[in-house]
Image (cartoon, rainbow, N blue to C red):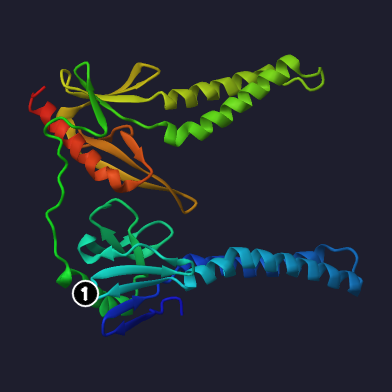
Amino acid sequence: MLKKCKYKFEPNQISIYPKYTLLYVFVILSIVLMITSVVFVFFATEEFSMPFMLQMLGAVALTLFVIFFLSSFLPALIVAKNQIVFDLRKSEIIQKGLFGRKKPIRFNEVSSVVNKNRGIQVGYFIELKEDPYGKGIFLHQDTNEFKTVVLPAIENAIFSKAVFTPERKAEITSGKFEYYTFKDGKYHIHTNPFRKFAVGLVVVSLIFLATVYYYFYGSAGDKVDMKYMFISFGVLLIVAGLCSKKGYFDPKQKELVFKFYGIAFSRYSLSEFYNFSITRNTTNGMYNGTDVKLLFKKADGKIKESLELRDFGKTKGIERFIDETKHIVEKIQNKQS
């Protein structure tokens, strides 16, 4: 039942109704929670009078109904109305939902339809030229019916009508960079460590200030132990150090250098540059950024990964960033300072 493919073919459009497996997990967990809670109440209650038991079971059932509604039924209702329409007349992809529709996507904006594992969703995704490292548009799970019946029709609709335009190339040969600044003979990366660590810095700072306050101004009984003040200060120094990260390419030494607190921490020889590493990060299924790093191949064949050059919240800038980085690396490798 979970693998059933839902779609509709019409003369001028193809409609797909995505299947979100995660919702079934919520439903199953809610049912298990309800059953185990009722059993627990039954065996843990010392008062076995029927009226009391009925009251307790009623309260548990009501509480779990609210939990079930919020965690399962409500999101299920929202995504059940999700629909992806391929309009063959206008050559557009339209995403419809319970709360309206998104801006249409032209067929010629699509780069491919691929089968991928995106963490909480596994199946076929539409990938866009404008955002090749983004999450794309989820179509459907990888079922035999979708793969043999629906997918060929979608690919034929998109790629037979698409008018492809030449891929946009970053105009960086003249030195006009978005993610780098050439200063003091070095190419400095516009790192953004605060995107990752700003919240942590604020939280740790507040904890440290609280320990200082309670140590110096708290009453005798409430004074915090000095070791907690030093521990929180040490953690604060670490987080502040992460926020102080700077990176640059050194044409003279032909190195990628990372500094923390103004001190060189890591160096990577550009003569060993091998490729890019792009990692999409999720926490408990929620997207929290995409890292771009460099890979370096040693003489013994081992691959070494650099520290993160930049963390992207929105993936549309990654292609430009890679083009600029590649241009700088090649320029330094060719000894053109």
Whether 165 is drawn above or below 53: the answer is above
Q: Residue at x 38, y 44 (%)?
A: 313
Left or right: residue 3 compared with residue 208? left
Look at label 1 and name its amino acid: Ala
Whether 161 is drawn above or below 220: the answer is below
Q: Residue at x 59, y 63 (%)?
A: 71
Quarter of the image with the C terminus is top left
Across the whole image, how many numbered discs are drawn on residues? 1
Left or right: residue 9 compared with residue 272? right
* Viewer-nearest residue: 297 or 163: 163
Task: Give the labeled residue for mark 1.
Answer: 157
Residue 102 picture location, percent across and down = 38, 63
* Viewer-nearest residue: 192 or 303: 192
Q: Secondary structure at mark 1?
A: helix
Q: Quadrant of residue 296?
A: top left
* Viewer-nearest residue: 64 or 302: 64
Residue 148 picture location, percent across and down = 26, 79
Residue 281 picture location, percent across and down = 40, 46
